[in-house]
Structures are given as structure tokens and as C-alpha cells.
Amino acid sequence: MGYKKSKVSIASIVEAGMRVLARQGYARTSLMDIANEVGMSKGAVHYHFPTKEALMAKVLQTACDTVADRALEAWTEVDSPNDALRSALRTLWRVRAGLSDEAKVVADLLAQSLHDESLRAPLAEYYRFAAAQVEQHLGGHFRALGATPRMPIERIPRLLHAILDGMLMQKIVDSDAIDEEYVLDVLEALALSLLDFGPPTEPPAPG
Amino acid sequence: MGYKKSKVSIASIVEAGMRVLARQGYARTSLMDIANEVGMSKGAVHYHFPTKEALMAKVLQTACDTVADRALEAWTEVDSPNDALRSALRTLWRVRAGLSDEAKVVADLLAQSLHDESLRAPLAEYYRFAAAQVEQHLGGHFRALGATPRMPIERIPRLLHAILDGMLMQKIVDSDAIDEEYVLDVLEALALSLLDFGPPTEPPAPG
Amino acid sequence: MGYKKSKVSIASIVEAGMRVLARQGYARTSLMDIANEVGMSKGAVHYHFPTKEALMAKVLQTACDTVADRALEAWTEVDSPNDALRSALRTLWRVRAGLSDEAKVVADLLAQSLHDESLRAPLAEYYRFAAAQVEQHLGGHFRALGATPRMPIERIPRLLHAILDGMLMQKIVDSDAIDEEYVLDVLEALALSLLDFGPPTEPPAPG
Amino acid sequence: MGYKKSKVSIASIVEAGMRVLARQGYARTSLMDIANEVGMSKGAVHYHFPTKEALMAKVLQTACDTVADRALEAWTEVDSPNDALRSALRTLWRVRAGLSDEAKVVADLLAQSLHDESLRAPLAEYYRFAAAQVEQHLGGHFRALGATPRMPIERIPRLLHAILDGMLMQKIVDSDAIDEEYVLDVLEALALSLLDFGPPTEPPAPG
DNA sequence: TATGAATGAGCCTTCATTCAT
DNA sequence: AATGAATGAAGGCTCATTCAT
């Protein structure tokens, strides 16, 4: 029961780590910065996380979970059933492009993972989960539209995420080049291109 | 003629920096590492580049140029005119996925650019150039196929790069999830989906 | 009855401290290590010993007592009365050279005492006690042999201990150079050299 | 030729390390202390010695060499040929008991070597060298006295060093118990006991 | 009696940078 | 044009100690 305070502290540290990491990036973030942000001593941070690596892993994990959670909203808060797809895509993009702390952290550590294998596992899991999420909901949308995609449906989620991530990178380095409407237009055009509304299946000829 | 600083030394340093940066990533690279790699003293490195930042900028610039150059080959070495598009896409992917030193450096510094504005300019320029390159050659391909895309053609290059970049990120994190054929299949299916071969050719008039 | 502090806990801590100190040496031993070894929290250790120094003192004291006790056996368990001396010396050597935890701790803290005066008192007491012990028993041995030493007998115990300690140091540093038989041979030869068997017993009277 | 300054600096650091180590002991000596003592920055110390361990090794080596050198004087500066042996022993004892910085360092690291194997090699070498030194000169003394020892002569040097070391330990913890005359008396008595002046060898009977 | 949390000083080490030569 | 020496600020981490519970 004494360890309730510990949970609170750990959460505070992770939150502070998220803010600092988002603000300064992995290379420029020190434990001192995080300790200052959370208002604790360096020693206290080390009391809860044995190494910087352990703390970073926890922050990354939390960031992935949060981003994934937030992406879920894309499929639930359907404003109008009409443009449900565009709305979902818009939310998906905003989760990234809003560059919330969590999204920044994911992006930052993604690059770190090039040289730090230990970061890869949670990110891989994140992509797997996100892809599964998209696949599940996309199926519904397509059925609702009465169309079959021109591509195996299970390939679409990773493609979608690739586009969102890739666009985000371009936006980061050149925010003028990419804006929300641009991304949504492209994605929608793409979605429509991928759908084959085909000829209505031949009704059985009457006797 | 006034500006000496032995171009050969500078080039050596940049090359060494490229290797080390690709191997260790920005966060783990020190000037000492680079000096060792090039076989010079730390002082010498500082003589040619007043600051680490300056060296990094030069390395990034070089990496961008090299990657862009290599991408050019995608459009020139067409093995068979038949599957010219697939072949070009394959080269484009390989330039990234091969993870040459230069490609790694671009990926690494791209993430750094999230927190270091000074890195963004060369990357933005790189994307602009790469997009222009694609646009120029893609137009030809499409014309050759006698098809018009279902999307303004000037939007396709950045989309293509986004997909390539995004796929690469997923591959880095989970190399089992993404392989070359997967990427090429997706891209080709996408390309075909995006193309509208116009109104069906006149059906033969009924007897 | 007033002083509680659970003697059992204190004893456990001292025992654990002995093990850890013997294993790692003073310089590398932290209270955390000891707390882990005894299965208590660091706080608990501090409850029983206000300071690390106090704990170390207690451990040293215990180590000295234990070593002294064990040395007593040297003079009691006489296997054969014949080579009683050699047997006693053997035991004395083994108490040290066996490098029991206690012996290691004594050796380790002996060096610490060079710079930590507070450690000297128990060690001084230990040597005094050990010398007295040897003197008492050695007297008996010599009388039994009907010989008088060529040196004031009260000087022999400290000499003996010096030799044992000094040989041990050489053994620690270069275990090939010193083995048990070597030490015992040297000591025995020395003992015999030190003994003066007095004027030859009256030769049988002529005719 | 630029590295002359380096040699000077390295020597200064080792000297300072010797002083600090002698004063505070291994466990309480930090690189900061040494840097302060030598009047350099911590970074400068690290520039010349990659790790603390490396510096300590060098200091130990130097201490061993210095002690060994100083012991040499024992055999060279013979005041009067008469009590040459006592004089030599006196010098030998003083080298230790004077507790020069070097002697302290050797004593201190000797105990560390119980738990730090890397320290043992130079100490083992030191003992080997010191023993050889004694053996060489002792032979001469004995021959000069026309006596043969009651113990293989090659065993005497290590015995002598053991006694000196062991006596020193007792002196450290209880300086009242051991003084110079005491040690010298004991050693001399021992030396005489060990010598067998035997009956003059029978001259060959004349024809 | 014992624990978990927190502190703060200190440790070894790394590193970008400066400078005399 | 280049080097070796030196600096000083961090950085990650350890640890004896304190304290509320």
C-alpha cells in the first residue's frame, strides 16, 4: 500500500519524459532535464527507473499506446455517416500532424531505432496493432460502400500508415508543402481509385 | 583561390562522417569518432569545420545530393521497356531500402530535424528536387501508356515518396513485415488504380 | 531488556556484511549490497546501524573475534603429541590461508585502517589477544621440549604472527610462490633454530 | 617532439596520485582529488589516462619500483662493515616503516589486490624482485661471516619480507607495540639463530 | 521494527571546443 | 594545415543518508 505514491511518481516521470523528449529529442534529452521538468531530483528518477534506457522504453511504450488509442477515435466519432471515410482519415492525419508530444516521441524514437535495436519491438507492435485496427474498420466502410478494393484488403492498412508517416516527414521539413486538405484530397482520391464498384452482380435470370 | 582548406581533407572528413553517422547515428556520434575514422586529430577536424553542427550540415547536404543522384538512375537504366515502371519503382525503393550510408544519414537527420530547424532546409530542398524528378519522368511513362491519372499528376511524386519513406520506416522497425516484392506489388497496384485508361474503346457495333 | 533492536536482525546484518565484505572488499561494498544479501531494505539496515562506519566496525570486531577463536583450536586439537608444534602452526596458517570470510575481512580492513583510525583499535586488540594466546601455549611447548629459546619468549608471538601475515600477503599476490608445506617448513626450521637445547646432557662418566 | 609536455604532465599526475593515494587510500581517492592535487582539470587527467584503473596501475607500478630502488640502498651504504647486517636490516625496515607515500601505496593496494586481480601482477613481480635482491646480497654477508644457514638460503628472502611486512601491519594498528629497536633486535636474534658457525672444517691431516 | 521514497553530493567518463605550437 | 594538450560543462549513475508512514 505504500507503493501508491510510487505509481504516481512513475507516471509523473513518464509524463515529464514525454514532454521533454517531444521538446528536445532523444539526442538532447538528459535525465537532468526530465528531473527538472518533473520537479524531482536526479536520484529520484533513478530510483524509479534503473537506467535512462529503461525510462525511454517506458516513455516510448506509453507514446505508442496513446497514439494508438487516439487513432481509435478516428473510427468511432463519425460525425456524418456520409463522409465517414474522409472524416476518419482526417482524424488519423491530425493525430500525427497535430504533433502531439506522443506523436513527436514516436517519430523521434523511430529514427533512433535505426541504431538502437531495443526500441524496435514496441514500434513494431505499434504498427501491427495500428494496421489491425485500420483493417478491421476499413472492411466495414468498404462493405457499406458496396465496393471491393483493387488490392488485397490486408495490404491497405500498412500502405495507409506509410502514406501518413511519409507525408508527415515532408511536412516536418517543409510545412508549406503539405497541408491538411492536400493530404486528405490525395488520400480520398486514392481511396476511390482503389475501389472497384464493378457491375452489379448479375441477378439470376428468371425461369 | 583564396579559400584553401585543402578540399581533399574536407572531403575525407565528410566521407568519414558519413560512414560514422550511418553506423552510429547522430546521438552516438562524436567528433572523436569521426577524427579516428578519417585518421586525423580532433583539432584538424575543427580546423576545417568550426563546429560539429557545421560538419553535420555538410554531411547531410552531401547525403541528400547523393541519394537524389542515385534516384536518377531509376529513370535511366530501363532494363526492358515493358515493365519500365516497375523497374523504376524497384530502383527507387532499393536506393532507400538498401540502406546505403547516405540513405541512413538522411533518415537519421530527418528525425533530428524535428528538433533542429537548421537541418530542415536541405531536406526540404531534397524533397522538392526529388518530387520534380519524379514528376518529369512519370509524365512520360503515363503518356506512353496512353492513360491519364485520376489525380492531378503534380501530386503523385510527393505521394510516391511518402509511401517509400513510410514503408521504409516500417521495414526498419519490423523487417519481416515488409519486403521488396510487397512494396512493389502495392505500388504497382496503386499505379494501375490511379490510371484511367479512358472510355472503353467503342464496342463493335451490332450487326 | 531496554535495548531491543532485535538481536537476531543485527546478527543477520553483520553476517551478511561479513559475506559481502569478504566477497567484494571494502571499496566495492555498498549498504545496498548488504541489504540485498540479508533480504532487508536499506532503511532497515540504517535502523540498526546509524552509519556505514558503525556497521563496518561491528563486522570487523566480529571478524577479529571469530579469527581469534578459531586460532584457539590450534592449541587444543593436538592430533599426535609428537609433532604438536607443527600441527599447531599448520592450524594457525590455515585459519589465515583458508581465507575464510572472516580472515578476508580482517585482511581487508587492516589496509583500510591505514587511513581510518577508527578501525585500528579492534585490530590492535586482536593482535594483543592473539599474541597472548600464542605466548601462553608456546611456553608449554618449549618446556615440554626442555629447551630455552634464544630470544625472549614474549617476543616470539608477534614475530610468529608477522610471519604468518606476511606470508599470506605474498600468497595472495602470487599464490604459486607460497604453499602450505613451504610455510610450515620455514616455520619449523625457524622454531628449531630458535631453540637452544642447552649444554649437552652429562656424558657418561669414564671408567 | 610535441609530446615532451605530455611526459611531464603524466609524471606530475602520477606523483600527485601517489600523494593522494597515500593520504586517503584507494577507497577514498577520486580522480577529482588527484586533479586538484596536480592543479589540472579532471578532463586533463583523463586525457593522459583513459581510466582510473589505468592511472592506479601506473601509480602502483611506480610505487613498487621506487620501494624496490630504495631497498637497494640497504645493501650499498654500509656504514661500518662490522654491523653491516644490522645496518642493512635497519634500512630495509625504515623503507617500510617510514611509511613513505610509496610504501603506503604498496600496502594499500596490496589489500585491494585481494579483490582486484589486476593489481596482483605488479605486486607479485615486486616480491620476486625484492626476494632476488635480498638473496643476492645475503649470500655475501653469510659468506663473510663464514657461516652456513640452517635453512636453504633461497627461502630466507621471502621470510625476511614476510616479517617486515607483518611487523609493519602490527605497527600500523598499534604503533606502541612495535618500534625500530624491537624489530631490529628480533631480526638480528633470528639471523644469528639461523646461522650455524659449525666446527671449523677439519684441515686435511698431514701425511 | 521495517519499508519505500526521495535527496544531494559525488563519481567516472565523454565531449565539443580552444589554443599554443 | 595540423597536432597534442587542456578545459569545463554535462551526462549517466551510485550511494549514504533522511524521513514519513
Image (cartoon, coloured by chain):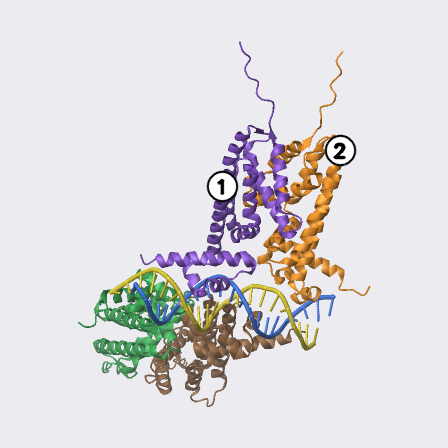
Chain colours: A brown, B green, C orange, D purple, E blue, F yellow
Most distant residue in the right direction: C1
Identify residue type, mark 2.
Arg
Task: Give SS at disc 1.
Answer: loop
Task: Give SS at disc 2.
Answer: helix
Residue visible at 36% across and 73% down? B109
Chain letter of the residue beneath label 1 in the structure image: D
Chain letter of the residue beneath label 2 in the structure image: C
Select label 2 or label 1 by which is in front.
1
Q: Badge 1 local density, few (<14 within 10 Å), some, or many (20+)?
A: few
**Numbered label tally:** 2
Residue visible at 62% across and 58% down? C116
Residue bearing the label numbered 2: C143
* Residue D135: x %, y % from top left: 52, 36
In the image: residue A131, left or right of residue C127: left
* Residue B88: x %, y % from top left: 26, 70
Q: Nearer the viewer, residue B173 or C161?
A: C161
Q: Is residue B114 above or below residue D203?
A: below
* Residue D14: x %, y % from top left: 46, 56
Q: Quadrant of the N terminus of chain A?
A: bottom right
> To which quarter of the image does residue D23 belong?
bottom right
Residue bearing the label numbered 1: D77
The residues tagged by marks 2 and 1 sit, at their Cα atoms, a distance apart of 42 Å
* Residue D13: x %, y % from top left: 45, 58
Q: Is residue A82 above or below residue C160?
A: below
Q: Nearer the viewer, residue B190 or A47?
A: A47
Residue visible at 68% across and 41% down? C155
